[in-house]
Amino acid sequence: MAAVRARIASRACLPGTRLPSVRAQAKAMGVSVSTVVEAYDRLVAEGSIASRPGSGFFVAGPVAPLALAQLGPPRERDVDPLWVSRQSLEADPAVLRPGCGWLPASWMYEAGMRKALRAAARADVATLADYATPLGHPALRQLLARRLAQQGIEAPAGQIMLAESGTQAVDLICRFLLQPGDTVLVDDPCYFNFHALLKAHRVTAVGVPYTPTGPDLEAFAAALQTHAPRLYITNAGIHNPTGATLSPVTAHRLLKLAEASDLVIVEDDIFADFEDTAAPRLAAYDGLARVIQIGSFSKTISASLRCGYIAARGDWIDGLADLKLATSFGGGRLAADILYTALTDSGYRKHMESVRRRLAQARGATLSRLEAIGITPWLVPQAGMFLWCALPEGNDAATLARACLAAGVVLAPGNAFSLSLRAGGFLRFNAAQAGDPRVTEVLAQAMRA
């Protein structure tokens, strides 16, 4: 297959060219006829060649056009909320990514995934081929209900709906509760994809300064009074990007403000399993009356396995299920089945204990290296992968990010997370991705320059 592809790519075989017969090709390459038959059939399946009964196999066409755009310099993107995602996802495997938001692949639950995939291969045909029910995998929703109960959140399986991901969960909630022109509160700084998603829904996002114990309540109250927002989207447990945790006092006062203004809160709990000691959950204090909790396992099991959840009031779940059917119909039945198997495997608990230990070590080591070049933490988080750090006076994070990108290091500049653009002197580091000494070497060189 590689030999045929190479001849096509080099234009030694143009579209319409007849390939050697199966027997001739087998003799020329010293392989069996059946091997060549399989190779040709696979090349037909991928569209590289075509079979003409009675005539043989021919190169499929037309010739691929010359991409003139690739001959010039790449267009430089603005350092916007999607800059970090695009640079991290599109980067060559050799590029270092201390600014990305996920664990290295080698830290993920590979053994559990492989075991779950083997189990899925033996599943009944309905699991492999049919659509999911509107709410999703019943056993997984029962498991999620038990997990939520451990955090004090009473959510029976009927109040939990599976989604394709945490991002789709937020998207469905926005479709369900918002109209174009509505206002949504977010933390400043906050997860940058919230900005991009709200922009796609054509709503106005208003940032509220975030403190080491939660949102600034005076600013929050002022924003409620001035903007009459419909939603507030935040992180539960470990805050992204700061690593801060919500205090009980702030949580209670925040819910009182929300109740007085008829505000709905979306609490993203994607980092729950990274905590050593669980922080307060707004959904637990509120009883899911005006708080919707979402989550997924893309940060702990696999980012390739797209499955998230929404826990909310029963009447809202009904409406969200209708909306999910209208926009994506079934949902990932197979993904949910694999996730359930992985979560209920005895190895998952040990896997997360190992991840938490490794993260604790990585946070300490990364902070030491950063402080040695003058970069200081806004706070020292107790859990998770993120470090929100201030640069030495006079350094601009976006300028440094561009310079470091040219040297093969993807950083996360502060203003990608900040609606007010007041975080130009900050970078978010992922301790799990920052272990290579070249990260601080390249960064120190860029700051000197």
Image: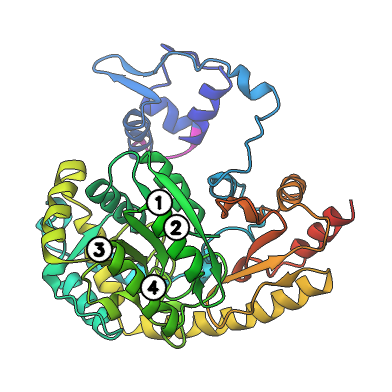
Question: Whole-Å distance between the Cαs marked 1 and 2?
Answer: 6 Å
Question: Viewed as shown, does residue 449 lie left or right of 418?
Answer: right
Question: Whole-Å distance between the Cαs marked 3 and 1?
Answer: 26 Å
Residue where numbered disc 3 is placed: 310
Q: Which numbered disc, 2 or 4, marks the residue that appears first in the sequence?
A: 2
Q: Which amino acid does label 4 sit on?
A: Leu
Quarter holding the N terminus?
Answer: top left
Q: Position of residue 240 (x, y in %)?
A: 51, 65
The residues colored magenta run 29-33
> Mark 3: which secondary structure?
strand
Residue depicted at x 76% and y 71%: 370
- Dot 3, how many residues are within 10 Å of its Cα: few (below 14), some (14-19), or many (20+)? many
Q: Which numbered disc, 4 or 1, marks the residue that appears first in the sequence?
A: 1
Residue where numbered disc 2 is placed: 223
> Mark 4: which secondary structure?
helix
Residue 398 appears in the picture as rendered: yes
Question: Whole-Å distance between the Cαs marked 4 and 3?
Answer: 21 Å
